[in-house]
Image: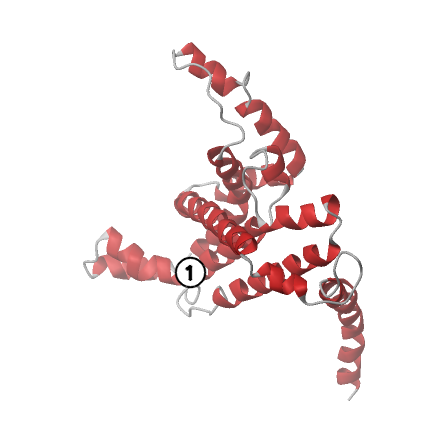
Amino acid sequence: MQNKSTRALYLIPYGAWIALFVVAPIALVVYYSLFDIHGDFTFANYKAFFSSIYLELTLSSFWYAFLITLFSLLIAYPTAYFLTKTRHKQLWLLLIIIPSWINLLLKTYAFIGIFGQYGPINAFFAAIGIGSTQLLFTDFSFIFVSVYIFIPFMILPIFNAIDRLNPALIDASRDLGASPWTTFRRVILPLTMNGVKSGIQVTFIPALSLFMITRLIAGNKVITLGTAIEQQFLVTQNWGMGSTIAVFLILFMFIIMLFTGQKEKGGASIGKTK
């Protein structure tokens, strides 16, 4: 009985934290979504969300988030795999993670200088005779910068999953005559899928709500759900519509987390040889 009461006591700070910083903000967003710009109770915001404008905005957000996640995964998986094969893998992993400690705004402004009209890339193009090219305010620059920012978060869970993989399973696959591609497809990838799912979560979900990069790098040519929320709250002052978009964004995030939920694979770490 004493252990149960002690555990219940320890749960109080956790429960208070969840109530104050998770449940209460979501409840507040839902509350504001039920009022229009004049403060009158209405469901018109939810009806407006299903109009062609916001549906197109939602599809566009998912498309850009998908591209950012796909390119991040295509770069991160082989990078994480080869990192596990290096001698000083923890050091190399640290060097990849360190840029993520730099303020996001500083990195964004750095890319404005790199992709700018008088930046080093355009200087290189001019030197080889191509001439200056408009790189900023394009889909390419937006996706490139976003992928650069999210790659460390994609690499880390995949690296951990591959590093915990039992090497005896790979040796057994090769001894049984499987090709490298078959070994990867039938052994390595399934047993590291939890790391891939974690990487998708920490990349796709934030990519849905990007707004600062769309402002500074894409020049508002790319509009996402995050940009729409910012405009509704700060520009049009329509907190009800902004909260409605936020409600659906939270719902989308919850659905994505359900689809990328993890299931333990028994062969990933059991019996790992040194």
Question: Relative to residue 180, is residue 110 depicted above or below?
Answer: above
Q: Quick one: 174 or 103, which is closer to the camera?
A: 103
Locate residue 186, reporting x and y percent: 29, 61
Give the quadrant of residue 108.
Answer: top right
Instruction: Give me the residue at 39% from left, 67% from top.
Output: 267
Image quadrant holding the C terminus, namely bottom left
Instruction: Give me the residue at 74% from left, 45% from top.
Output: 234
Instruction: Give me the residue at 38% from left, 11% from top.
Output: 129
Is 95 left, or right, of 32 in this rendering? left
Question: At label 1, which amino acid type do we have?
Answer: Met
Give the quadrant of residue 16.
Answer: bottom right
Q: Residues within 10 Å of mark 1 (few under 14, many from 20)?
A: many
User: Residue under circle 1?
Assistant: 193
Q: Which residue of the protein is positioned furthest toward the bottom in this rendering?
A: 1
Locate residue 4, reporting x and y percent: 75, 84
Image quadrant holding the N terminus, namely bottom right
Q: Quick one: 274 or 4, which is closer to the camera?
A: 4
Can you see residue 87? yes
Question: Relative to residue 199, is residue 114 depicted above or below?
Answer: above
SS state under label 1: helix
Instruction: Give me the residue at 48% from left, 18% from top.
Output: 122
